[in-house]
Amino acid sequence: MEKNKQLKEINVKVIDSKIAKKFTIENHYMKTFPVPKVCFGVFYNKLLRGVITFGLSPSTKQKVKKIVPNINDNEFIEMQRMNLSDVLGHNAESFVLGKVYSLFKKNTKIKLLITH
């Protein structure tokens, strides 16, 4: 498979939840928006082309504690929604999640991200 050259042009940054909600409701197949703790915008050519939200569901803590019993409550978070435009090309999901992981590592105490 040919390398996706568009990946170099993708930027990921924290965005306001109101912007994330509008994009998600308009573009995600579920048409719902759980209450997030943090929202990331995925920008390509300076246009919003995707949103990823993270938060905690009622069962998140229970799932995490089964795997990592000694983890603190502020050290984990769960991906709630991921919606990327097809214009980003192949492997965009993996590339964007890598950027998100780096942002969490650099700016928070999060040690565990649950993704689906």
Image: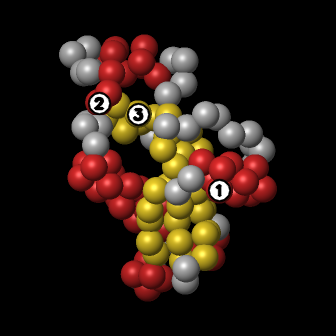
Residue at 73 percent of width and 54 percent of height: 22
Contact between marks 1 and 2 (CB within 8 A): the answer is no
Label 3 and label 1: CA atoms lie apart by 21 Å
Dot 3 lies on which element?
strand
Q: Is 47 placed above or below 71 here? A: below
Q: Residues within 10 Å of mark 2 (few under 14, many from 20)?
A: few
Q: In front of the other: label 3 or label 1? A: 1
Circle 3: residue type? Ile
* Image position, residue 68 (x, y; %): 26, 20
Label 1 and label 2: CA atoms lie apart by 26 Å
Give the mark nearest the N terminus, 1 or 2.
Answer: 1
Dot 2 lies on which element?
helix
Residue beneath disc 3: 77
Q: Is 105 placed above or below 46 here? A: above
Q: Which mark is residue 75?
A: 2
Label 2 and label 3: CA atoms lie apart by 7 Å
Circle 2: residue type? Glu
Q: Which mark is residue 19?
A: 1
* Image position, residue 40 (x, y; %): 50, 55
Q: Is 78 placed above or below 25 here? A: above
Can see residue 91?
Answer: no
Contact between marks 2 and 3 (CB within 8 A): the answer is no
